[in-house]
Image (cartoon, coloured by chain):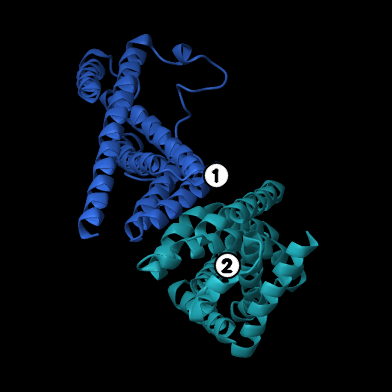
Chain colours: A cyan, B blue
Amino acid sequence: MTGALRQVYWLLWKDLLLEVRRRDNLLSMFFFGLSLLFLFSFAFEITSDNVAGMAPGLLWLAFMFSGTLALGQLFQGDRENDCLDALLLAPMDRGAYYLAKVLFNFSLMALLEIFILPLFGILFRLDFWHLLPDVLLYTLLGTLGFCVVGVLFAAVTLRARARALLLPVLLFPLMIPVILGTVRTLQIILGAGAAPDLVPWFRLLVGFDLIFITAGFLLLEWVLDG
Amino acid sequence: MARRILGTLALILIVTGLYWGLVEAPPDARQGETQRIMYLHIPSILVAYLSFFIVFVGSCLYLWKGERRDDNLAHSAAEIGVLFTALTIVEGSIWGKPTWGVWWTWDARLTLTAILLLIFTGYLLLRSLIEDQRRAAVSGAILGIIGFLDIPLIHMSVYWWRTLHQPPSILRPDKAPWDNIDPAMLWPLGINFVAFLLLFFYLLSLRIHLGEVEEQARRDRLHDTA
């Protein structure tokens, strides 16, 4: 097990190092998310009365769209110079490769969320500073769910035509439990929902994460073979 | 020959069931004539559920054993499932307009059915966008499995989100089917259900045969060029 953990660590380290040196994913994701926030303010009439009910949905749209962009680029680095083939030839657990990719995409999205959440609060005058730890917890639970399924389908669509379009088409319907779960929990935290509903939604999010991280771990092997 | 008998039997039963349901059976006490669409609506959705279950079984078998036959089964069932899900939604809309006053409403089961349609249309789209046959089969199998695992979670989340659909009258946990519905209505419904099942297996066997012929043609072409 320690061997597999070390493999995950080095694979993740490789991707993070590349990201630190190139910074292409994070910067584009950040500016994409920011421009979405501006679009929201034009598209919707957001006032201090309705901001608590609307914020979770808008934030999640921004996170999901940015996350989908990141997923589209996820295997790009490894495909250049046939790096992926070399990785697959190495005596490495395929599951470790999957987990490293999930953690990498998760880190990118988590960083984005840490930037975007306070910005959203400032731009739309949402007073949620004392609730920020809770908001972050549920956002990250949902983000993990998004990544565990997203990475699998980023790999599945890797060699398909029109894959940039295909990925969200496949991914979004599957993401409905995550979207509803995070949006509803955040609304409850921000005071726009019934508090007793928090526990079932929380369980749903955790269940989703556990089921699909197991499924992804087991299924990625077939995707990468051949 | 067996297929022709199956098809003829399905045709006879459908004509019988439709005549019984649309002409002989009494109109509903409250909904009147519009309720008669139930004789098509319920068999359609049950057949659609059956097909998605077969997609799941075929996908698992294909990943496990790697035989083209199982993939062909999953692919064929998915096509028929999409057809019957779409039919169910259209029939529901036609019924919903006079009964609820709207073509569509964001009720839990309506939404769930629409999501099923999205996921399995995505399945067909994915397969059509990958050239390599083996890779298309593996990708389809992964989506078939993940999609099926996701259905209970989507069901729960959408159900918690909202519900308005009339409660099921046939499959209820507290009562046997024949206690909930007048025999004059249960008979045509039962006949239509058997008829739709036969139709499903007839279409499935046709579609599987088509898949085999396509596979044979592909192999012959390879043989000729070699």
Q: Is residue B185 above or below residue B84?
A: above
Classify the position of the N terminus of chain A by image quarter: bottom right
> The residue tagged with tag 1: helix, strand or loop?
helix
Q: Residue at x 71, y 68 (%)?
A: A7
Q: Is residue B84 above or below residue A136?
A: above
**Crowd around label 2: few <14 · some 14–19 · many ≥20 (10 Å):** some
Where residue B206 appears, as percent x and y from the top left, is 25, 34
Left or right: where A195 falls relative to A173: right
**Which chain is mark 1 on?**
B
> The residue tagged with tag 2: helix, strand or loop?
helix
**Which chain is mark 2 on?**
A
**Crowd around label 1: few <14 · some 14–19 · many ≥20 (10 Å):** some
Q: What residue would you read off at disc 2? A: A88
Asked whether residue B158 appears in the rendered view, the answer is no
Residue B30 image-quadrant placement:
top left
Amino acid type of the residue tagged 1 in the rendering? Leu
Q: Residue at x 51, y 58 (%)?
A: A223
Q: Which mark is residue B149?
A: 1
Where residue B136 appears, as percent x and y from the top left, is 39, 55
Q: Are marks 2 and 1 on the same chain?
A: no
Amino acid type of the residue tagged 2 in the rendering? Leu
In this view, the residue in front, A116 or B84, is B84
Q: Which mark is residue A208?
A: none
Where residue A202 appears, as percent x and y from the top left, is 69, 52
Residue B190 image-quadrant placement:
top left
Q: Residue at x 33, y 34 (%)?
A: B99
Left or right: where A90 falls relative to B77: right
Q: Residue at x 76, y 68 (%)?
A: A6
